[in-house]
Image: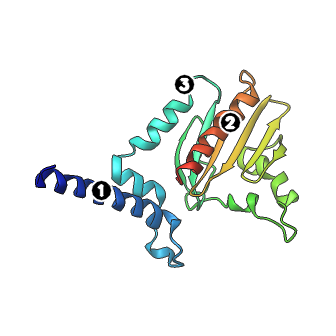
Amino acid sequence: MSIRTSKKNNNNNKQNENKKKILNNEAGGSNDNNNNNKKNLNDVIENEDGGQFWKQIITNLFEHDYISGVVIFDLNGIVITNKNINTKSFPKQGINLSKYFEKTPLGQLNKEVVANCGIELLGDGYIVEGVSKYSIYGFNSKTKCGFSLEKTKTTFILGTFNEKQDKFDAFGVIGSLANDFRAIAL
């Protein structure tokens, strides 16, 4: 290996390490309590690739028509990206999605808070059907539509499906995306 190639590899390694540090530290992964120095996850990624990262993820989700809409939020509840879900009702300063995953002193999710999840996010008629550590599933029996809310280390993912789509396929697509995010610590 030549000196030139070695320097080039070192520079590439340093750039990759810097990107990881940016994503971890500035997007909220740091243990610092100074929130003023933390950047929105969306800002960090958009600076890296012009927003193509999120656009590609959203586009791929709709490839097989398993879901009807999706919103990806950062941990502050600020919309990062969305498709086919009206996000105008969500406050620009963010919505508190963490409350749905907060545990009681007994280590369980607060049933009263979780029960309102669908209604607060999507409107009347949405009833929570299932809850796990990082997932909340709901359904609207009148419209035959449903939702899945997933929590990852740095995002919340809200996916919806309509009466033409199978709810288990929809839950699977959103759950798989969340699992992918968890696996790569995104």
Is the residue 27 above or below the residue 161 in the image?
Answer: below
* Numbered circle sitting on residue 43: none
- Mark 3: which secondary structure? loop
Q: Residue at x 75, y 24 (%)?
A: 163
Give the residue at mark 3.
63
- Residue 43: image quadrant is bottom left
Whole-number angstrom distance, CA of label 1 to CA of label 3: 34 Å
Whole-number angstrom distance, CA of label 3 to CA of label 2: 15 Å
Whole-number angstrom distance, CA of label 2 to CA of label 1: 39 Å
Residue 36: where, in percent of width, then height? 46, 75
Sequence-wise, the earlier of marks 1 and 3 is 1
Residue 134: where, in percent of width, then height? 72, 52
Is the residue 24 above or below the residue 140 in the image?
Answer: below
Q: State the residue in front, 173 or 149.
A: 173
Residue 132: where, in percent of width, then height? 79, 50
- Mark 2: which secondary structure? strand
Label 1–label 3 contact, CB within 8 A: no
Give the residue at mark 1.
13
Sequence-wise, the earlier of marks 2 and 1 is 1
Kindly identify the amino acid type of the residue bearing the numbered disc 2.
Thr
Q: Nearer the viewer, mark 1 or mark 3?
A: 1
Q: Nearer the viewer, mark 3 or mark 2?
A: 3
Kindly identify the amino acid type of the residue bearing the numbered disc 1.
Asn
Indicate left or right for 35 with 129 as reference: left
- Residue 180: image quadrant is top right
Say few, some or many: other residues with alpha carbon within 10 Å of mark 1 (under 14 / 14 to 19 / 20 or more).
few
The chosen color scheme is rainbow
Kindly identify the amino acid type of the residue bearing the numbered disc 3.
Glu
Indicate left or right for 135 with 83 as reference: right
Say few, some or many: other residues with alpha carbon within 10 Å of mark 2 (under 14 / 14 to 19 / 20 or more).
many
Give the residue at mark 2.
160
Sequence-wise, the earlier of marks 3 and 2 is 3
